[in-house]
Amino acid sequence: MDLRRRREQLQARVIDLQFDLGGLAYEMAIRNRIRIDLLLERAAVLQSADAELAELDRILRLQESATAGECPSCGAPHSSGATYCWQCGSRLLSEVRLDSWRRASSAGDASAMPGGSSMPGG
């Protein structure tokens, strides 16, 4: 799905969820029957949608200079260089162990090192 289209859908959903949460709180208040558990449940749904919307906004801002991908665990979108998934917390970047890097460096195997460089930062 196109990220801009997904963003528009999420933005509409966030607006609907905000409206519904406000309406629910109002209805509970006028009936003097406040259910905090229900309000918190609905607020959590809104918070999740709002977090995804914020991440899509960030990805779209970075899209011109970075490519985006999807989390292999949950499918949530992420920007280039993201270390952990914002949705499920799964690690997105593979970990390069320092001892492996040193062995590759001493063996002169530049392809085994991050960026394919034989010098750190190079």
Image: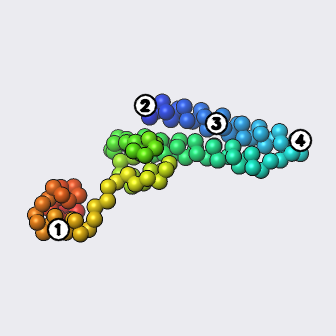
The amino acid type found where label 4 is placed reads Arg
Residue that mark 2 sits on: 2
Q: Earlier in the sequence, mark 3 or mark 1?
A: 3
* CA gap, disc 2 and disc 4: 43 Å
Q: Residues within 10 Å of mark 3 (few under 14, many from 20)?
A: some
Q: Which mark is residue 15?
A: 3
* CA gap, disc 3 and disc 2: 20 Å
Residue 70 % position (x, y): 40, 42
The amino acid type found where label 3 is placed reads Ile
Q: Which mark is residue 103?
A: 1
* CA gap, disc 1 and disc 2: 43 Å
* CA gap, disc 3 and disc 1: 54 Å
Would you say residue 85 is visible in this rendering? yes
Residue 116 in the figure: left or right of residue 23: left
Q: Earlier in the sequence, mark 3 or mark 4?
A: 3
Would you say residue 59 is visible in this rendering? no
